[in-house]
Protein backbone atom coordinates (compact mmCIF):
# COMPACT_ATOMS: atom_id res chain seq x y z
CA UNK A 1 0.00 0.00 0.00
CA UNK A 2 1.15 3.52 -0.83
CA UNK A 3 1.51 6.21 1.85
CA UNK A 4 0.23 8.83 -0.59
CA UNK A 5 -3.19 7.53 0.46
CA UNK A 6 -2.68 9.45 3.73
CA UNK A 7 -2.44 12.98 2.30
CA UNK A 8 -5.93 14.03 3.46
CA UNK A 9 -5.36 13.01 7.09
CA UNK A 10 -3.88 15.06 9.95
CA UNK A 11 -0.49 14.26 11.51
CA UNK A 12 -1.80 12.02 14.30
CA UNK A 13 -4.04 10.11 11.90
CA UNK A 14 -1.18 9.73 9.40
CA UNK A 15 1.02 8.19 12.10
CA UNK A 16 -1.66 5.67 13.10
CA UNK A 17 -2.60 4.74 9.52
CA UNK A 18 1.05 4.55 8.47
CA UNK A 19 1.54 1.81 11.08
CA UNK A 20 -1.54 0.05 9.72
CA UNK A 21 -0.13 0.15 6.17
CA UNK A 22 3.14 -1.32 7.50
CA UNK A 23 1.23 -4.23 9.07
CA UNK A 24 -0.78 -4.87 5.89
CA UNK A 25 2.34 -4.80 3.71
CA UNK A 26 4.26 -7.04 6.12
CA UNK A 27 1.35 -9.49 6.22
CA UNK A 28 1.34 -9.73 2.43
CA UNK A 29 5.13 -9.91 2.09
CA UNK A 30 5.77 -12.50 4.82
CA UNK A 31 2.45 -14.34 4.45
CA UNK A 32 1.99 -14.25 8.25
CA UNK A 33 -0.53 -12.89 10.77
CA UNK A 34 0.19 -9.35 11.94
CA UNK A 35 -1.15 -7.74 15.14
CA UNK A 36 -1.36 -3.99 15.73
CA UNK A 37 -1.24 -1.99 18.94
CA UNK A 38 -4.40 -1.70 21.07
CA UNK A 39 -6.70 1.08 19.90
CA UNK A 40 -9.65 2.80 21.59
CA UNK A 41 -13.07 3.21 19.96
CA UNK A 42 -12.21 6.43 18.16
CA UNK A 43 -9.05 5.07 16.56
CA UNK A 44 -10.80 1.79 15.70
CA UNK A 45 -13.41 3.83 13.83
CA UNK A 46 -10.73 5.83 11.97
CA UNK A 47 -8.88 2.67 10.91
CA UNK A 48 -12.00 0.78 9.87
CA UNK A 49 -13.16 3.68 7.67
CA UNK A 50 -9.72 3.73 6.04
CA UNK A 51 -9.79 -0.05 5.46
CA UNK A 52 -13.27 0.14 3.92
CA UNK A 53 -12.12 2.85 1.50
CA UNK A 54 -9.16 0.65 0.53
CA UNK A 55 -11.44 -2.42 0.30
CA UNK A 56 -9.35 -4.40 2.74
CA UNK A 57 -11.35 -6.98 4.66
CA UNK A 58 -8.80 -9.64 5.65
CA UNK A 59 -8.76 -8.62 9.29
CA UNK A 60 -10.61 -8.95 12.57
CA UNK A 61 -10.72 -6.91 15.75
CA UNK A 62 -9.66 -8.72 18.92
CA UNK A 63 -9.64 -7.76 22.59
CA UNK A 64 -9.36 -11.10 24.47
CA UNK A 65 -12.94 -11.21 25.82
CA UNK A 66 -16.49 -10.35 24.82
CA UNK A 67 -17.25 -6.65 24.19
CA UNK A 68 -13.85 -5.11 25.00
CA UNK A 69 -13.29 -1.39 24.55
CA UNK A 70 -9.64 -1.51 23.46
CA UNK A 71 -8.82 -3.91 20.62
CA UNK A 72 -6.03 -4.88 18.24
CA UNK A 73 -6.42 -5.34 14.49
CA UNK A 74 -5.43 -8.79 13.33
CA UNK A 75 -4.42 -8.87 9.66
CA UNK A 76 -4.13 -12.31 8.09
CA UNK A 77 -3.15 -13.84 4.72
CA UNK A 78 -5.68 -15.87 2.74
CA UNK A 79 -4.35 -19.21 4.00
CA UNK A 80 -5.55 -18.35 7.54
CA UNK A 81 -9.02 -17.11 6.59
CA UNK A 82 -10.90 -20.32 7.46
CA UNK A 83 -9.09 -20.71 10.80
CA UNK A 84 -9.69 -17.07 11.72
CA UNK A 85 -13.39 -17.10 10.84
CA UNK A 86 -13.95 -20.38 12.70
CA UNK A 87 -12.09 -19.00 15.78
CA UNK A 88 -9.50 -21.80 15.64
CA UNK A 89 -6.48 -19.52 15.90
CA UNK A 90 -4.87 -19.16 19.32
CA UNK A 91 -3.88 -15.61 20.21
CA UNK A 92 -1.61 -16.62 23.10
CA UNK A 93 1.34 -15.99 20.81
CA UNK A 94 0.39 -12.33 20.50
CA UNK A 95 -1.60 -11.31 23.58
CA UNK A 96 -0.90 -11.99 27.26
CA UNK A 97 -3.00 -11.79 30.40
CA UNK A 98 -1.13 -10.71 33.52
CA UNK A 99 -3.11 -11.39 36.68
CA UNK A 100 -2.51 -9.31 39.80
CA UNK A 101 -3.98 -10.81 42.97
CA UNK A 102 -3.93 -8.34 45.85
CA UNK A 103 -3.05 -9.27 49.45
CA UNK A 104 -6.03 -9.46 51.83
CA UNK A 105 -5.44 -6.01 53.31
CA UNK A 106 -5.65 -4.33 49.88
CA UNK A 107 -8.59 -6.18 48.40
CA UNK A 108 -11.41 -3.88 47.20
CA UNK A 109 -9.02 -0.91 47.57
CA UNK A 110 -7.73 -0.49 43.99
CA UNK A 111 -9.62 0.90 41.01
CA UNK A 112 -8.81 0.86 37.29
CA UNK A 113 -6.69 4.03 37.50
CA UNK A 114 -4.51 2.50 40.21
CA UNK A 115 -3.49 -0.36 37.92
CA UNK A 116 -3.10 1.77 34.80
CA UNK A 117 -1.05 4.30 36.73
CA UNK A 118 1.34 1.54 37.78
CA UNK A 119 1.87 0.43 34.19
CA UNK A 120 2.45 3.99 32.99
CA UNK A 121 4.92 4.53 35.84
CA UNK A 122 6.94 1.60 34.52
CA UNK A 123 7.19 3.37 31.17
CA UNK A 124 4.69 1.18 29.32
CA UNK A 125 3.02 2.96 26.41
CA UNK A 126 -0.79 3.05 26.57
CA UNK A 127 -1.12 1.41 23.15
CA UNK A 128 0.57 -1.74 24.47
CA UNK A 129 -2.23 -2.19 27.02
CA UNK A 130 -5.75 -3.43 26.31
CA UNK A 131 -8.60 -3.40 28.80
CA UNK A 132 -7.92 -3.81 32.51
CA UNK A 133 -10.51 -6.04 34.18
CA UNK A 134 -10.84 -5.14 37.85
CA UNK A 135 -12.67 -6.88 40.68
CA UNK A 136 -12.33 -6.95 44.47
CA UNK A 137 -9.51 -9.53 44.32
CA UNK A 138 -7.28 -7.71 41.85
CA UNK A 139 -7.12 -7.29 38.08
CA UNK A 140 -6.36 -8.99 34.79
CA UNK A 141 -4.20 -6.87 32.51
CA UNK A 142 -4.58 -7.52 28.77
CA UNK A 143 -1.24 -6.62 27.17
CA UNK A 144 0.93 -7.18 24.12
CA UNK A 145 2.93 -10.40 24.44
CA UNK A 146 6.15 -8.48 23.81
CA UNK A 147 5.95 -6.76 27.23
CA UNK A 148 4.92 -9.85 29.22
CA UNK A 149 8.38 -10.70 30.60
CA UNK A 150 9.08 -7.08 31.50
CA UNK A 151 5.87 -6.85 33.51
CA UNK A 152 6.38 -10.16 35.30
CA UNK A 153 9.86 -8.96 36.31
CA UNK A 154 9.08 -5.35 37.20
CA UNK A 155 5.48 -4.99 38.43
CA UNK A 156 6.40 -6.15 41.92
CA UNK A 157 9.05 -3.44 42.11
CA UNK A 158 6.21 -0.94 42.48
CA UNK A 159 5.25 -0.28 46.09
CA UNK A 160 1.54 -0.73 45.33
CA UNK A 161 2.11 -4.31 44.09
CA UNK A 162 4.96 -5.47 46.36
CA UNK A 163 2.80 -7.94 48.30
CA UNK A 164 0.65 -9.01 45.36
CA UNK A 165 0.79 -12.27 43.45
CA UNK A 166 1.65 -11.61 39.82
CA UNK A 167 1.37 -14.31 37.18
CA UNK A 168 0.63 -14.96 33.53
CA UNK A 169 -2.60 -16.84 32.86
CA UNK A 170 -4.04 -18.44 29.74
CA UNK A 171 -6.45 -16.37 27.66
CA UNK A 172 -9.33 -18.71 28.42
CA UNK A 173 -8.86 -18.13 32.17
CA UNK A 174 -9.49 -14.38 31.96
CA UNK A 175 -11.87 -12.86 34.50
CA UNK A 176 -15.51 -13.14 33.49
CA UNK A 177 -16.99 -9.72 32.89
CA UNK A 178 -20.63 -9.44 33.88
CA UNK A 179 -22.26 -6.41 32.33
CA UNK A 180 -24.70 -4.86 34.76
CA UNK A 181 -27.58 -3.16 32.99
CA UNK A 182 -30.14 -0.83 34.44
CA UNK A 183 -32.80 1.48 33.04
CA UNK A 184 -32.52 5.10 34.13
CA UNK A 185 -34.38 8.26 33.21
CA UNK A 186 -32.86 11.69 32.70
CA UNK A 187 -34.40 15.07 31.95
CA UNK A 188 -32.64 17.50 29.62
CA UNK A 189 -33.46 20.85 28.05
CA UNK A 190 -32.44 19.64 24.58
CA UNK A 191 -31.03 16.55 22.83
CA UNK A 192 -27.60 18.16 22.45
CA UNK A 193 -24.67 15.92 23.31
CA UNK A 194 -23.29 18.21 26.03
CA UNK A 195 -26.65 18.27 27.84
CA UNK A 196 -26.91 14.49 27.81
CA UNK A 197 -23.28 13.94 28.85
CA UNK A 198 -23.75 16.32 31.80
CA UNK A 199 -26.69 14.22 33.04
CA UNK A 200 -25.04 10.84 32.41
CA UNK A 201 -21.74 11.89 34.00
CA UNK A 202 -23.49 13.77 36.87
CA UNK A 203 -21.55 16.94 36.22
CA UNK A 204 -22.01 20.56 35.14
CA UNK A 205 -22.46 21.54 31.52
CA UNK A 206 -18.98 23.13 31.44
CA UNK A 207 -17.46 19.92 32.82
CA UNK A 208 -19.37 17.92 30.17
CA UNK A 209 -17.87 20.17 27.48
CA UNK A 210 -14.40 19.46 28.92
CA UNK A 211 -15.05 15.70 28.85
CA UNK A 212 -16.05 15.99 25.17
CA UNK A 213 -12.95 18.10 24.37
CA UNK A 214 -10.76 15.46 26.06
CA UNK A 215 -11.97 12.96 23.42
CA UNK A 216 -13.66 10.78 26.03
CA UNK A 217 -17.09 10.66 24.37
CA UNK A 218 -18.14 8.30 21.58
CA UNK A 219 -21.49 8.18 19.80
CA UNK A 220 -22.15 4.93 17.97
CA UNK A 221 -18.44 4.10 18.49
CA UNK A 222 -17.25 7.30 16.81
CA UNK A 223 -15.31 9.89 18.80
CA UNK A 224 -17.36 13.11 18.80
CA UNK A 225 -15.95 16.56 19.58
CA UNK A 226 -19.01 18.57 18.53
CA UNK A 227 -20.86 19.42 21.75
CA UNK A 228 -23.97 20.51 19.83
CA UNK A 229 -24.45 17.16 18.09
CA UNK A 230 -28.10 16.11 18.24
CA UNK A 231 -28.65 12.70 19.86
CA UNK A 232 -31.43 10.38 18.68
CA UNK A 233 -33.22 7.28 19.92
CA UNK A 234 -31.11 4.10 19.65
CA UNK A 235 -27.84 6.06 19.70
CA UNK A 236 -25.16 4.46 21.84
CA UNK A 237 -23.01 6.76 23.93
CA UNK A 238 -19.75 5.74 25.58
CA UNK A 239 -18.18 8.09 28.12
CA UNK A 240 -14.75 6.80 28.98
CA UNK A 241 -14.54 6.36 32.74
CA UNK A 242 -18.32 6.66 33.19
CA UNK A 243 -19.86 3.79 31.24
CA UNK A 244 -21.87 2.88 28.16
CA UNK A 245 -25.40 4.07 27.51
CA UNK A 246 -28.11 3.46 24.93
CA UNK A 247 -30.88 5.98 24.26
CA UNK A 248 -33.91 3.71 24.41
CA UNK A 249 -36.78 6.17 24.09
CA UNK A 250 -37.77 9.80 24.43
CA UNK A 251 -40.65 9.17 26.82
CA UNK A 252 -42.15 12.64 26.62
CA UNK A 253 -41.79 16.22 27.80
CA UNK A 254 -42.21 17.99 31.08
CA UNK A 255 -44.54 21.00 31.42
CA UNK A 256 -41.56 23.26 30.88
CA UNK A 257 -40.72 21.48 27.63
CA UNK A 258 -37.74 19.46 28.84
CA UNK A 259 -37.13 16.02 27.30
CA UNK A 260 -37.60 12.91 29.47
CA UNK A 261 -35.31 10.14 28.14
CA UNK A 262 -35.22 6.46 29.06
CA UNK A 263 -31.67 5.10 28.91
CA UNK A 264 -30.12 1.69 29.34
CA UNK A 265 -26.89 2.01 31.30
Image (tube, rainbow, N blue to C red):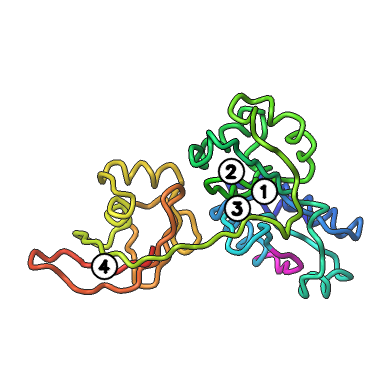
Drawn side of residue 221 relative to residue 230, left or right: right
Mark 4 neighbour class, 10 Å CA radius: few under 14, some 14 to 19, many 20 or more: many
Mark 2, secondary structure of its residue: strand
Task: Using the image as rendered, state which of residue 226 and residue 67 is in the foreground.
Answer: 67
Q: Earlier in the sequence, mark 1 or mark 4?
A: 1
Left/right placement of residue 259 relative to residue 245 reads left
In the rendered image, which quarter is residue 246 located in? Answer: bottom left
Question: Disc 2 versus disc 3: distance between alpha carbons?
Answer: 20 Å
Q: Which residue, given by chain and number where applicable, does mark 1 sit on? A: 142
Stretch in magenta:
53-60
Residue 250: give x, y in percent of width and height.
Answer: 26, 72
From mark 3 to mark 4, how far is it between C-alphas?
29 Å
Residue underneath mark 3 = 70
Q: Would you say the residues marked 1 and 3 are in contact, meaning their CB atoms lie under 8 Å apart?
A: yes
Comparing labels 2 and 3, the label whose residue is closer to the camera: 2
Q: Earlier in the sequence, mark 2 or mark 3?
A: 3
- Identify the residue under disc 4: 261
Nearer the observer: mark 1 or 4; the answer is 1
Instruction: Name the residue: 58% across, 28% down.
Output: 160
Structural crowding at the residue carrying mark 3, measured as other residues with C-alpha within 10 Å and reported as few (<14), some (14–19) or many (≥20): many
Q: Earlier in the sequence, mark 1 or mark 3?
A: 3
Q: What percent of the width, then of the height, locates residue 236?
A: 43, 65
Q: Which residue is mark 2?
A: 138
| Quadrant in which the C terminus is drawn | bottom left
Most common SS among magenta residues: loop
Q: Which mark is residue 41?
A: none
- Tell which of 24 and 254 is nearer to you: 254
Amino acid sequence: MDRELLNKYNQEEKLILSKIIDKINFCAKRNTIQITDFYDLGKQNLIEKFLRIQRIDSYILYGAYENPERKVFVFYPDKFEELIKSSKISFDEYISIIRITLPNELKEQYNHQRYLGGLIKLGIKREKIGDILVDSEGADLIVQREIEKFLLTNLQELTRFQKSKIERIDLDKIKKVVEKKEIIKITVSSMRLDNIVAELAHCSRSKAEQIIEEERVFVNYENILKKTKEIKENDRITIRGKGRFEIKEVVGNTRSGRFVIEIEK
